[in-house]
Amino acid sequence: QAVLTQPSSLSASPGASASLTCTLNSGINVDTHNIHWYQQKPGSPPQHLLRYNSDSDKQQGSGVPSRFSGSKDASANAVVLFISGLQSDDEADYYCMIWHSSAWVFGGGTKLTVL
Amino acid sequence: QVQLVQSGAEVKKPGASVKVSCKASGYTFTDYDINWVRQATGQGLEWMGWMNPSSGNTGYAQKFQGRVTMTRSTSTSTAYMELSSLRSEDTAIYYCARWTLRGDTAGFLDYWGQGAPVTVSS
């Protein structure tokens, strides 16, 4: 079982909201990890969006609008990247990342299409 | 301004080695760890390891243990990633990236190099 599992794709309309999930392996407790989210557009390196540990311990990436936010769903052992007011420019690949067993691990990524 | 400038594209034969460079500027090179991440065409991100440019200490992903070596030159503010025993599955873009908070998972990768394409083909 993969450490982090993300749906491969998601579509949403401009102006709508999108929730991108990242499910942790059942052997990893979501409550004890900092979760990072990165956005990557074609032909460019990834860009850090935000770090989320809890509502009182989180950090927005430099210049990242507040439309991007994070949360945890302990019941599902998952983390969520929430994007409100979708814009065409949000169309990209999104990756979650955690530190596990002395290594950084990325999820497989979700391709978000805004149409 | 902070910049990480990587070396150019490489084409290697299976079994060979490749050494990718990452020249840092705009900050004190030894103050921030450098991480390496690769991405095969159309695939996701894969973390390879980190290096502390001050001490030279490194940490590698288990998958690459024994095949990867990360080094640096503090005089030229350049980090290097060498991957040996190349196979076709190593064909990818290799990125270096700066970690903001040494030894703290609350940090993040803030500046990235432009990527160095490596093709492994006979």
Image (cartoon, coloured by chain):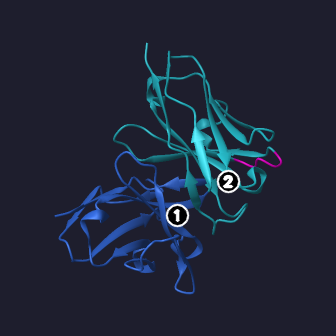
Give the image quarter of residue A15. bottom left
Q: Which residues are magenta?
A: B51-55
**Dot 2: what SS?**
loop
Q: Is residue A90 left or right of residue A63?
A: left
Q: Is residue A5 above or below residue B13?
A: below
Image position, residue B72 (x, y; %):
75, 38
Give me the disc on residue A27.
Answer: 1
The amino acid at mark 1 is Gly
Image x and y of residue B67, in percent: 64, 30
Q: Residue at x 65, y 36 (%)?
A: B65
Is A44 in front, or is A92?
A44
Element carrying mark 1 = loop
From this viewpoint, which residue is outermost toward the top? B122
Left or right position of A115 against A10: left
Mark 2: few/some/many CA within 10 Å (<14, 14-19, 20+): few
The label number, if any, that marks residue B26 in the structure image: 2
Q: Which mark is residue A68?
A: none
Q: Amino acid at mark 2?
A: Gly
Colour in which the image shows chain B = cyan
Secondary structure, magenta segment, majority class:
loop
Q: Quadrant of the C terminus of chain B?
A: top left
Q: Which chain is blue?
A: A
Q: Relative to A10, is A32 on the left or the right? A: right
Is B74 displayed left or right of B16 in the figure? right
